[in-house]
Amino acid sequence: MEPYTGQDFYCDVAIPRLVDLDVVHEDERVLAFHHTRPFWQVHLVVVPTAHIPSLTAATAEHAADLTALFTVVQQVARTVEHEHGAAAVLTNLGAYQDSKHLHVHVHAGPRRRPGTT
């Protein structure tokens, strides 16, 4: 996969499925898949299909999308914890957020070295 240089990988590439993703959950509100460039041994991403710029930008109008998102985050995290003995859940904000679309990382295991898959 070519390096993505835009602002919203999820709206531009992942949600419209312009790349082959290893999907673990998909419905009208939420997409969950194995990260395309994993930082950890186990690394999944859960995103709302509606564009919400970040957790801190979410408003009351996003309530149904957030409920659906965190329901799937809980399911994915539960599975990772069960299979690997532990799980971490993380979202980034501001300058830490490479893609300007709310997304939640669920991960376990050691960090990967850059350039490894």
Image: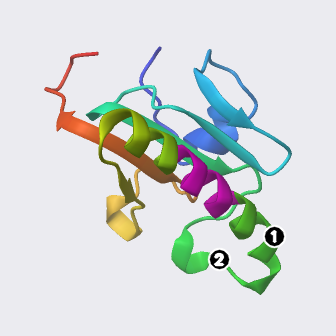
Nearest to the observer: residue 106 or residue 87: 87
Task: Please name the residue shown 62% across and 49% down the image.
Answer: 47
Quadrant containing the C terminus is top left
Label 2 Cα neighbours within 10 Å, binned few <14 / some 14-19 / many ≥20: some
| Residue linked to disc 1 | 64
Question: Is residue 70 highlighted in magenta?
Answer: yes
Residue 53: where, in percent of width, then height?
A: 60, 65
| Residue linked to disc 2 | 58
Nearest to the observer: residue 73 or residue 59: 73
* 89 horizontally vs 24: left or right: left
* 11 horizontally vs 107: left or right: right
Nearest to the observer: residue 30 or residue 79: 79
Task: Please name the residue shown 76% across and 64% down the image.
Answer: 65
Secondary element at image label 1: helix
The type of residue carrying mark 1 is: Ala
Residue 83: where, in percent of width, then height?
A: 40, 33
The type of residue carrying mark 2 is: Ala
